[in-house]
């Protein structure tokens, strides 16, 4: 077996949360909605460069209680997207009203930007500083 790269991540939500997440990932990050199998629950597959990298699944019951008021994500900590153009990203996040924090990576030519999606999941945007 040889692992190659992260294929996708899935976010399970209550049906009423689905649209806000779809709008966040398409509007903030520019992912595009694409073809999705006909599962027995609503959802969206969001594509980056022709690959479905974010799967949204409205497969939680409406009465599902989110731990810690939406701040905890269990043992899942975050997902990272490799990005380019740090300045344009700062501008886009600011224009969209998305709060973010930044963290240069000690001893590595990397810079991280962290945001939270409407479900409370942390998203890391990783920039190589030598670019």
Image (cartoon, rainbow, N blue to C red):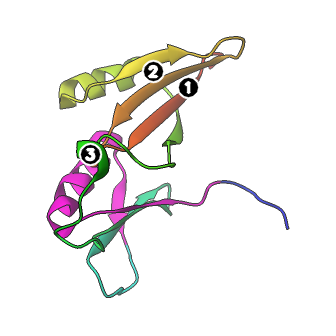
**Image point 25% across, 57% down: which residue?**
22
Specify the quadrant that holds the N terminus: bottom right
Image quadrant where residue 129 sits: top right
- How much space separates mark 3 and mark 2, taking CA atoms? 28 Å
- How packed is label 3: few (under 14 Cα within 10 Å), some, or many (20 or more)? few
- How packed is label 2: few (under 14 Cα within 10 Å), some, or many (20 or more)? some
Kind of element beneath mark 1: strand
Circle nearer the viewer, 3 or 2: 3
The image's mark for residue 70 is 3
- The residue where tag 2 is placed is 86
- How much space separates mark 3 and mark 1, taking CA atoms? 27 Å
**Image point 43% across, 39% down: which residue?**
123
Image quadrant where residue 43 sits: bottom left
The image's mark for residue 127 is 1
- Residue 127 lies, in percent from the top left, at 55, 25
Mark 2 or 1, nearer chain start? 2
Residue range highlighted in magenta? 6-34
2 and 1 marks in contact (CB < 8 Å): yes
**Image point 22% across, 62% down: which residue?**
18
């Amino acid at each position: 077996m040889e692992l190659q790269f992260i294929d996708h991540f899935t976010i399970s939500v209550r049906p009423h949360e689905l649209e806000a997440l779809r709008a966040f990932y398409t509007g903030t990050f520019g992912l595009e909605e694409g073809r999705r199998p006909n599962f027995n629950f609503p959802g969206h597959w969001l594509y980056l460069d022709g690959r479905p990298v974010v799967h949204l699944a409205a497969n939680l019951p409406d009465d599902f209680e989110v731990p810690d008021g939406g701040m905890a994500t269990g043992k899942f900590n975050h997902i990272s997207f490799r990005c380019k153009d740090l300045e344009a990203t700062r501008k886009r996040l600011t224009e969209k009203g998305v709060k973010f924090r930044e963290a240069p990576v000690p001893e590595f030519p990397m810079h991280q930007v962290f945001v939270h999606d409407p479900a409370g999941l942390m998203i890391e945007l990783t920039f190589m500083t030598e670019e």
